[in-house]
Amino acid sequence: MNKWCCPRGRKTYHHGNLRETLIESALEILKEGTLADLSLRALARKAGVSQTAPYRHFEDKEALIAVLKEEGMRKLSAGMQELMETEPDPLERLHKLGTKYVEFAEIFPAHFKVMFEYDLCDYEKYSALHKVSDNSFQYLQETVDECLALPDARKIDPSVAQFGAWSMVHGLSVLLMNQSLIEHMKKGHFEGLGDRNNIADQVTRFFCNSLVK
């Protein structure tokens, strides 16, 4: 069992849980393919319901995407909030936030894909998504600011450091999801990298240490 959520098997549709079934079916489509493969028609086929059934809960594909984004952001935000409440040392917390982000991408690849690979036409339309997205970045932002307030911190523009931290963990997550590329690079260029957990640990710690003298 991982600490992000309780494991669950494939839900079968019965009266009353259509929305949950559709969301799970959408995530399965994304695990197997790309965002181009996701449509309400494909979703209905995957869930084994009528072609009109998805419209009971989702106005269109974008509304479905917004729900998937929000669900993913809430999962990520919950893991980050726990660290905000339990880890007092800002450098250590920033390190753990980074590895948590990478861990999230590994455990929830379909959520990660839809969160960052699909640009909503009207982002402001989905207020709940907007709020939870802001919360996730705020945890990272506040922790970086605390690091830069330490006595031995380097003189760095906070905005640059915040965006740098996000870029680092996001880019690392994307690279580590490409397992074949990582294995190729380890053989040809980075033989001492170790496994994925070691890579995430060392790279995030390197970034955190770069903020202080």
Image (tube, rainbow, N blue to C red):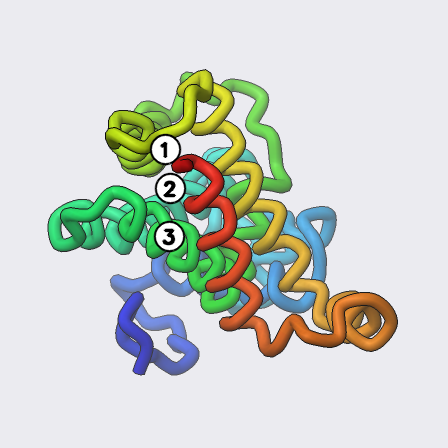
Residue holding disc 3: 95
Q: Are marks 2 and 3 in contact (CB under 8 Å)?
A: no
Q: Quadrant of the N terminus?
A: bottom left
Residue holding disc 1: 137
Check disc 1 and give the amino acid type: Phe
Tell me the element at label 1: helix
Q: Residue at x 57, y 66 (%)?
A: 199
Q: Is residue 176 left or right of residue 213?
A: right
In the image, residue 98 sits, relative to residue 138, either above or below, namely below
In the image, residue 60 sits, relative to residue 160, either above or below, namely below
Q: Is residue 142 left or right of residue 200?
A: left
The foreground one among 122 and 39 is: 122
- The image position of residue 175, as x and y in percent, is 68, 57
Q: Are marks 1 and 2 in contact (CB under 8 Å)?
A: no
Check disc 2 and give the amino acid type: Glu
Check disc 3 and give the amino acid type: His
| 2 vs 3, front mark | 3
User: Based on the displayed image, in which of its 4 quarters is residue 144 positioned?
Assistant: top left
Tell me the element at label 3: helix
The answer, for residue 50, to whether it is visible in the render is no
Q: Which of marks 2 and 1 precedes in the sequence? A: 2
Q: Residue at x 47, y 63 (%)?
A: 201
Q: Are marks 3 and 1 in contact (CB under 8 Å)?
A: no
Query: Could you give the CA–CA distance between mark 2 and mark 3, rounded to whole angstroms?
Result: 24 Å
The answer, for residue 149, to whether it is visible in the render is yes
User: Based on the displayed image, in which of its 4 quarters is residue 12 positioned?
Assistant: bottom left
| 1 vs 2, front mark | 1
The foreground one among 163 and 106 is: 163
Residue holding disc 2: 70
- The image position of residue 58, as x and y in percent, is 44, 40
